[in-house]
Amino acid sequence: MTDNMPSDIYAIADIHGRADLLEAMLRHIAVASRERRSKPIVIFLGDLIDRGPRSPHVLDLVASTLSLYPGSRLVLGNHDFYLRALLREELSYEDAVNWMDWGGVATVSAYSDRPVPDFKGIAADIRDAFPHHSHLLENALTYKEIGRFCFVHAGIRPGVPLRAQTDYDLRWIRSGFLDHMDAFDHIVVHGHTITSSLRPEVYANRIAVDTAAYRTGRLSAAVIRQDTLSNFICTHLIANGEIAVEEWLP
């Protein structure tokens, strides 16, 4: 690949521990990029962890992808925030309870054999065995602008300049964003809220990509080419247990 090759942007949402679906997605991106002679940029929209069974391997795959494809970035999701807080030893009791209720047990049990209340010991185990995971989370963004698009985990607060958005809104917002009908300064590409169709959904001002991979076995990505939404990619389990890849136009 040379510097004058065009870049294809792949925005992957809410993997939630489904390393199997992510591996298939990344293989497809690699093949498509060779065939198109393009440079892939992969933007992970956050929520790498929880609920699904293989969160540590997902972080390994994301870290290797960021190294392989220059310009690729991770946007921190609300679930990832809890893991970062754990590793910083800043996880509050309230956050710990919420995290475990929202799928965190699957993550900490995949990392460590220690009982769930021993968060200090679990954090030490993760730092010892996976030091690069702390680095990955510490270097995550709250949002990424590329051309006409803004890539974010949850969404943005209408009427607030992008640089003035709160980290909380960028990771958590639903009401006020999902029901906002007017244009934003960018087309917002986001996850966090599962689409009602369980397929990516396109609106006038946003593109929603969370298709509940942990529950449906369907992981989705939006593909941006030449500053325009080109198509969607989905990796999903089929009846024989294999993973199929599907592409379709918006």
Image (spheres, grey):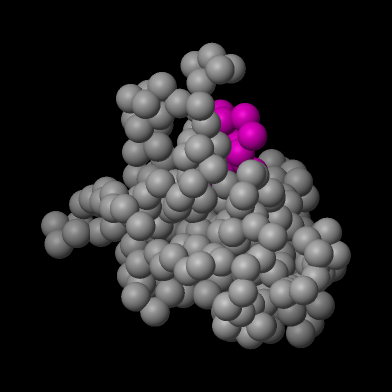
Task: Classify residue 113 by image quadrant.
Answer: bottom right
Figure quadrant of residue 85 = bottom right
User: Is residue 203 in view?
Assistant: yes
Residue sitting nearer the eye, 242 or 42: 42
Q: Position of residue 238 (x, y in %)?
A: 19, 59
**Residue 83 falls inside the magenta stretch:** no
Q: Residue at x 29, y 49 (%)?
A: 247
Could you say which is closer to the camera, residue 46 or residue 101?
Answer: 46
Q: In the orientation shown, which residue stands out farthest toward the top?
A: 2
Q: Position of residue 65 (x, y in %)?
A: 54, 36
Quadrant of res 45? bottom right
The magenta segment is 62-73
Looking at the image, how many numbered discs can be counted on the residues?
A: 0
Residue 64 covered by magenta stretch: yes
At a point 33% along the width and 64% down the height, the residue shown is 217
Q: Residue lying furthest left in this view?
A: 240
Q: Is residue 213 above or below residue 141?
A: below
Placement of 171 over or under 3, stated as above or below: below
**Residue 25: x percent and y percent?**
38, 45
Q: x%, y% of residue 200?
A: 40, 64
Is 224 left, or right, of 134 in this rendering? left
Asked whether residue 21 appears in the rendered view, the answer is no
Q: Residue furthest front?
A: 182
Q: Residue at x 37, y 26 (%)?
A: 36
Residue shown at the point (61%, 79%) measured from the top left: 180
241 relative to 65, above or below: below
Q: Quadrant of the C terminus?
A: bottom left
